[in-house]
Image (cartoon, grey):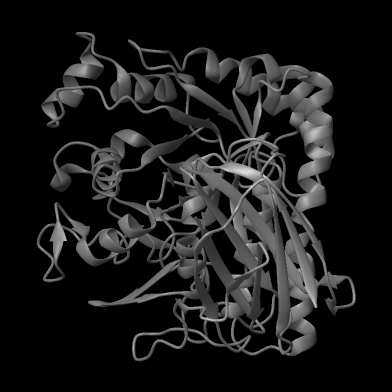
Amino acid sequence: MANITVNTRRSVGTINRNLFGHFSEHLGRCIYQGLYVGENSPIPNVNGIRADVAQALRNLHIPVLRWPGGCFADEYHWRDGVGPKADRKRMVNTHWGYVVEDNSFGTHEFLELCRQLGCEPYINGNLGSGTVREMSEWVEYLNSDGDSSVVRERRQNGREEPFNVKYFGVGNENWGCGGNMRPEYYADEYRRYQTYCRNYGENKLFRIACGPSDVDYQWTEVLMKNAARYMDAITMHYYTILGPDWQHKGSATAFTAQEFYTTLRKALAIEPMISKHLQIMDRYDPEHRVGLIVDEWGTWHNVEPGTNPGFLYQQNTMRDALVAALTLNAFIAHCDRVVMANIAQTVNVLQAVVLTEGDKMALTPTYHVFDLYQAHQDAAAADCFIQGDMAAEGLCQLHASASFKNGALTLTVANASADKPAEVTVALDGFTAREVSARVLVGAMDDYNDFTHTAVAPKALDSVKIAEGQLRFTLPACSVAELTCR
């Protein structure tokens, strides 16, 4: 038996819809063949944006999309990707696979993608190999309505009105691929670059500083001490890796039950990391003005056999779905301070929600977790307390989040056991459920979807009953469920 108590009278805050954001980098087949096929492709598209993928992402109501990187951001020069496509500069993507980048997908194409998806753009500027002037003029190109040469250039390229981009990152992973900088040096560079990222009109830029990789608390300490007053948010990156190091990450589809549980335990490690970084931030920002953004997260496995190692293409199983659920729960638990998160990456790369091959498309188990969690967007987080069994040593069987919006209570529950169902009773404090509907994503721990078969997709969870003011149901092993009470 497992007992969950949901208290709608207690809340840590509103769950920012941007916690369910996504990340798209010029890496492998994320942009080209994934999100963008070009206007002349036989694959159905609208202005070059792949129609089936765009519809799948619209169905998720993705709130924000990060671009162009990632490591690629700090070697990307934005003027290479504007103007007539025949005249755009060709380059070799030295970070990812040494393939030719023809820059046919640039600023206008990305913002057209965001328009079609109905999401906010989050653009990452080039601090590592770019210049202050280059970054300043990109912000001007995006957001100014003045009669400058830069704005005339935008108008020549077909956009009369400013794009009014809000979210702007000043560099990426500058401790590594973005320049191998010391935190003291980056803090000074950040202060300098952000000075020239101007506000235009009514649009106030949300300036995002490059933060740490997982447990690099010293980076956070130095950045907050020296630059907190100049930023609106600081980033953090954390990848869930099964293997002992980056050279031995493990297979995406062939793993043991022990490896399944180890992966989930490593996913849960993100929560204490967030807590520690927030403690450091609070010392320099007691008013909580600066938010934390986890703009790269997800599983990182070995690439699929026979694929380009630089493309980071991996399959996606129910194990990944549970990692997504546990990670989203951590963000919801800290929704008073975590203001955005972006899974890596949207299509065909790492823990993708969509896979494509030619004109075929598959929705991954992770896609369906984002679907089940949709109702949490902009809802009030409700206090959620769980008493139950262990799935394995150091890993609780049940993990849950709850929220309240528009008179409805949403409860999402994950069963982290590979083989044991759970008999669950949910007590509702401050809410009377008169009707309930439920969906569940369930499968074997290594089940995945591909272009020939769909092994897992949400279906009705018919076991849910209301009895004596409580919810009672059986949650299958290796599953994620969404319950909606009214």
Across and down, in percent, residue 392 comes to 85, 79
* Image position of 24 (left or right of 473): left
Q: Compared to 464, does 447 lie above or below?
A: below
User: Where, by quadrant of the figure, is residue 418 drawn?
Assistant: bottom right
Residue 57 rendering spot, x and y as whole percentages = 34, 58
Where residue 86 sits in the image (x, y, percent)?
Answer: 14, 47
The residue under the point 68% across, 28% down is 186
Q: Quadrant of residue 223?
A: top right
Residue nearer the viewer, 230 or 98? 230
Residue 453: give x, y in percent of width and height. 37, 90
Q: Residue sitting at 64 percent across and 90 percent down?
A: 254
Between 415 and 124, the one nearer to me in the picture: 415
How many marks are shown on the rendered structure? 0
Is residue 466 at least partly visible in the picture?
yes
Q: Nearer the viewer, residue 87 or 175?
A: 175
Residue appearing at x 74%, y 81% in the figure: 417
